């Protein structure tokens, strides 16, 4: 059964920033800049993915993220996954 | 030629203080660090040696998810030891000549038990990505190495309650043999959570809270002893070769002059004198001392009904004719049983006693059990006593015993 996506890009961006702030105490850089520039490592990125999965109730294919992702890359990945729900 | 190994830095995170000065103050005043422990959903309460504070201010917030309580306390204690040794930023020139030797029984136990709770009762199937690394036994040593750029051997020892004794002894050997110039060595434990308390309670080994004063619940060598009191903490030292310390003008606290390690090979949970006496004999031999040369012994004595008499017998056998003359105390009455940090804590007590000329007391020992007859230091510290050589004994489940000897310079 398919469901309608109710998450806008802005809402997903806000959720990513909220997870980074709550868990790691960090304000992420501009959405077009690599997240790792803020000091987060690859495991922290996995934790952000897990937080999004929990929020959206769907799996995000981590392997489709580029090596050094931006917030915009996460948003795009989330939208693809939400559309396939 | 074997090198002299000296202690140049002290770092305490303990129930009786978070600096050498605070620990000294508690020892001289014979003030207890034992208070009442309880946990949500756990019906029993126990006395425990609880360390105050969360130590988050030692870290960037982005690192906190990776850090179990044991690692936070360990990094704080190691920082203190390095600052005391005059090396506050760690090593300017990292190289293979420095190492870390840490002892622990359970590693990141808080993280491990929380994940098991989440899995079993919280419906989680997948852990947070940092869970595995926060729960590792070697996480404390790893974080100290990262922070202070120590790239030589970074080794974690686990032999139950003698873990940090083995770690310190290993560090001694590396430096003495000329393979290292400097080491951060000690131990750590953070297991004051309900599942671990429940496991210990299953042994019927834990003391119940004293009805009049919970601070008096741990009574080693006493006829009224009722069991051990679990504690947490981290204690680390900077050890280095005497020539390395002299070359950089470091202050020396004491010489680490002897180390012995031996196993009971008897029973996984019951001690036997043969391992303890062998460890003491080996440490004295290593230091080139006779039993009568010792001015003070810090005993393992946890206040269990069966353990204390075995240890008293071991000490009498190991000391021979000197058994009635060498003062013995167990400071666990004040700081509790710090498990993986126990040997380090008690070696630290010996260093302070040696530096400040006093015999630490066995607190609350007003009714000595005749089966634990020794030259005790009951109730009050004895001041004005010169300590030339001192020994600290530790015994672990599984049978591994360690003894460390300190000598005054």
Image (cartoon, helix red, strand yellow):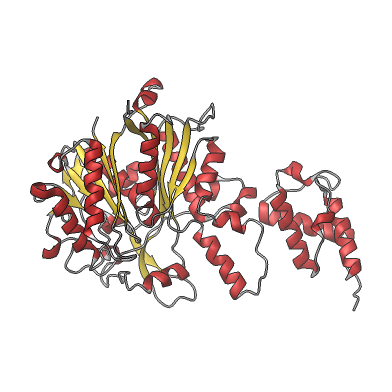
Q: Which residue extends farthest front?
A: B265
The percent coordinates of residue B107 (x first, y second) are 48, 56
Look at the image and tell me whether residue B355 can be seen.
no
Q: Quadrant of residue B396?
A: bottom left
Horizontal side of B150 relative to B129 (left or right) equals: left
Position of residue B178 in the picture relative to residue A5 (left or right): left
**How many numbered discs sit on the rendered protein?**
0
What residue appears at the point 60 percent right and 53 percent down from the top-left corner?
B66
Where is residue B152? Give x, y as percent.
51, 35
Query: In the rendered image of this protein, does residue B208 appear above or below residue B241?
Result: below
Q: Is residue B158 above or below residue B181?
A: below
- Residue A70 visible, this orientation: yes
Quadrant of image for the N terminus of chain B: top left
The residue positioned farthest toward the top in the image shown? B247
In this view, A27 is above or below B210 = above
Q: What residue is rendered at 36% in x and 70% in y?
A: B46
- The residue lying toward the viewer, choosing from B173 and B382, is B173
Residue B131 location (% of width, % of height): 61, 59
Which residue is depicted at the point 28% across and 58% down? B264
Q: Residue at x 58, y 66 (%)?
A: B115
Q: Position of residue B163 (x, y in %)?
A: 38, 52
Image quarter where the C terminus of chain B lies is: top left
């Amino acid at each position: 059964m398919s469901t309608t996506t109710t998450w806008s890009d802005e809402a997903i961006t806000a959720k990513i920033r909220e997870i980074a702030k709550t868990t790691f105490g960090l304000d992420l850089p501009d959405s077009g800049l690599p997240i790792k520039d803020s000091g987060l490592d690859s495991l922290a990125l996995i934790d952000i993915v897990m937080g999004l999965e929990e929020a959206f109730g769907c799996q995000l294919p981590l392997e489709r993220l580029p090596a050094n992702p931006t917030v915009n890359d996460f948003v795009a990945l989330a939208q693809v996954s939400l559309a396939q729900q | 030629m074997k090198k002299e190994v000296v202690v140049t830095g002290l770092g305490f995170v303990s129930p009786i203080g978070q600096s050498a000065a605070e620990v000294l103050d508690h020892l001289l005043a014979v003030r207890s660090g034992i208070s009442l422990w309880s946990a949500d959903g756990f019906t029993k309460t126990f006395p425990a040696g609880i360390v105050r504070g969360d130590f988050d201010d030692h870290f960037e917030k982005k690192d906190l998810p990776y850090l179990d309580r044991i690692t936070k306390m360990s990094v704080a204690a190691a920082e203190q030891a390095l600052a005391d040794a005059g090396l506050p930023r760690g090593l300017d020139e990292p190289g293979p000549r420095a190492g870390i030797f840490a002892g622990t029984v359970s590693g990141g136990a808080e993280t491990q038990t929380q994940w098991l709770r989440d899995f079993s009762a919280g419906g989680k199937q997948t852990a947070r990505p940092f869970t595995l690394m926060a729960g590792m036994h070697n996480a404390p040593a790893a974080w100290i190495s990262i922070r202070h750029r120590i790239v030589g051997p970074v080794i974690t020892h686990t032999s139950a309650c003698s873990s940090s004794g083995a770690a310190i002894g290993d560090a001694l050997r590396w430096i003495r043999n000329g393979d290292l110039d400097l080491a951060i060595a000690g131990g750590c434990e953070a297991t004051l959570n309900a599942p671990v308390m429940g496991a210990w309670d299953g042994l019927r080994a834990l003391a119940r809270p004293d009805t009049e004063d919970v601070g008096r619940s741990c009574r080693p060598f006493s006829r009224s002893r009722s069991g051990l009191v679990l504690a947490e903490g981290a204690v680390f030292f900077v050890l280095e070769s005497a020539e390395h310390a002299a070359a950089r003008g470091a202050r020396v606290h004491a010489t680490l002059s002897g180390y012995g390690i031996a196993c009971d090979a008897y029973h996984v949970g019951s001690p036997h004198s043969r391992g303890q006496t062998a460890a003491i004999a080996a440490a004295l031999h290593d230091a080139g001392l006779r039993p009568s040369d010792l001015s003070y012994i810090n005993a393992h004595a946890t206040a269990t009904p069966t353990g204390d008499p075995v240890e008293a017998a071991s000490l009498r056998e190991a000391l021979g004719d000197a058994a009635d003359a060498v003062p013995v105390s167990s400071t666990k009455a004040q700081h509790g049983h710090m498990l993986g940090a126990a040997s380090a804590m008690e070696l630290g007590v010996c260093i302070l006693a040696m530096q400040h000329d006093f015999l630490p007391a066995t607190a609350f020992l007003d009714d000595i059990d005749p089966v634990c007859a020794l030259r005790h230091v009951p109730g009050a510290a004895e001041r004005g006593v010169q300590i030339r050589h001192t020994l600290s004994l530790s015994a672990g489940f599984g049978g591994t015993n360690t003894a460390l000897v300190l000598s005054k310079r």
